[in-house]
Image (cartoon, rainbow, N blue to C red):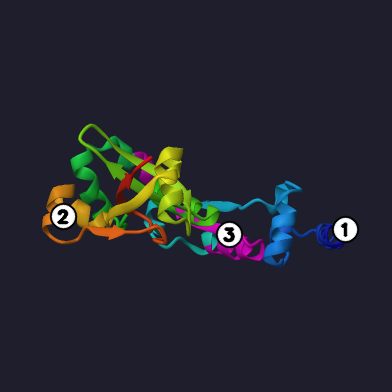
Amino acid sequence: KAEADLLGRVEEHLSDGQPARTLELSKEDAALLREAFLLTAKPVLYAANVGEGDLPDGNALSERVRQFAETENAGTVVVSAEFEAQLVELPAEDRAEFLEAAGVEVTGLANLVRAAYALLGLITYFTAGPKEARAWQIRQGMKAPQAAGVIHSDFERGFIRAETIPFAEYDRLGSESAARDAGVMRSEGKEYVVSDGDVMLFRFNV
């Protein structure tokens, strides 16, 4: 009965020309609707392309895109393909200066990725070992054991604790040992909710 009522509401909403993602739903109804795999229920992100001179905030046209996206419960990000094309041609060491001269803090691509992650409810945490550093994508709100399980199920099953460093501190200090010496490494337990950008070392036993 609940599913039939929900589908009736959705059908009426779609018949009015509205995408399914704009329909206000309870958590239970949203979970039911996901099983229908409706195209218009999926998250949407609009990229508003502007000239270099309109960075970083956009112009009247990109504002119209933002307003339209808002009516569809969609996201918007302002980018300049012209600016990005120039940026990738520069040596890596010159890019920060180029961004600063344009009054831009990060690249359009980085903004696009961040906006997409936010729209999808995703965050990133990092692991850094002697041989490689890796980024891992997880759902926002995930606790440390489940985040560890993304690497390997044994990590989650035998989770003991997670030694955690905020990315900004790791970047500033340069290594895990330096972060430990500076007292910015934290030991977190099973209830710890992973933050975006955490650098993590999992302790486990199976």
Provide residue 199's location: percent of width, then percent of height.
Answer: 29, 50
Within-10-Å neighbours for mark 3: few <14, some 14–19, many 20+? some
Question: Which structural element holds mark 1?
Answer: helix
- Mark earlier in primary sequence (1, 2): 1
CB contact under 8 Å: marks 2 and 3: no
Within-10-Å neighbours for mark 1: few <14, some 14–19, many 20+? few
Provide residue 73's location: percent of width, then percent of height.
Answer: 63, 62
- Magenta extent: 63-85
On screen, residue 129 above or below 11: above
| Residue visible at 60% across and 59% down in the picture | 74
Is residue 66 visible in the rendered image? The answer is: yes
Provide residue 205's location: percent of width, then percent of height.
Answer: 35, 42
Q: CA distance from mark 2 to mark 3?
A: 47 Å
Within-10-Å neighbours for mark 2: few <14, some 14–19, many 20+? some
Q: Quadrant of the N terminus?
A: bottom right
Q: Nearer the viewer, mark 3 or mark 1?
A: 1
Give the amino acid at mark 1: Ala
Residue under circle 3? 65
| Residue visible at 48% across and 59% down in the picture | 141
Q: Is residue 87 left or right of residue 33?
A: left
- Mark earlier in primary sequence (3, 1): 1
Residue under circle 1? 4
Provide residue 172's location: percent of width, then percent of height.
Answer: 17, 55
Q: CA distance from mark 1 to mark 2?
A: 56 Å
Q: Nearer the viewer, mark 1 or mark 2?
A: 2
Residue under circle 2? 180
